[in-house]
Image (tube, helix red, strand yellow):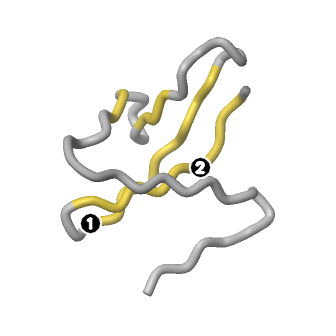
Amino acid sequence: VGEGRAIILHGGKMLDAKWKRGSNLDPFHIVDSNGNILYVPKGKVWISLVPNTKNPSFG
C-alpha cells in the first residue's frame, strides 16, 4: 500500500516510473511521470521487487 519507484526496461530502453496501490485489495498500477497508467507489454515479463534500501544495478 502506497507508492514507490519503478524502473521499466523494455525494447532496449529504461523508463523511470512509479508504482501505486491504494489498499491491500487494490491492484498495483504503474504510472509515468505524467500520471498516465503504463501497461505491461505482451510476452514474457520479469518483475523484481527490490527494497527501498537497495539500488538495483544493470549490466
Task: Return the mark for residue 59.
Answer: none
Placement of 25 over or under 15, stated as above or below: above
Q: Position of residue 52 (x, y in %)?
A: 75, 57
Q: Which residue is mark 1?
A: 13
- Is residue 36 toward the left or the right of residue 26 in the image? left
Placement of 19 over or under 51, stated as above or below: above
Q: Amino acid at mark 2?
A: Arg
Q: Residues within 10 Å of mark 2 (few under 14, many from 20)?
A: some
- Is residue 25 toward the left or the right of residue 52 in the image? left
Q: Nearer the viewer, residue 5 or 10?
A: 10
Q: Which residue is mark 2?
A: 5
Q: Report which quarter residue 23 is drawn in.
A: top right
User: Residue at left 43%, top 29%?
Assistant: 35
Q: Amino acid at mark 1?
A: Lys
Alpha-carbon span between mark 1 and mark 2: 17 Å
Q: Report which quarter residue 8 is drawn in.
A: bottom left
Q: Position of residue 24 (x, y in %)?
A: 71, 18
For this orientation, the residue located farthest to the front is: 44
- Is residue 26 toward the left or the right of residue 38 in the image? right
Q: Report which quarter residue 4 is drawn in.
A: top right
Mark 1 touching mark 2, by CB under 8 A? no
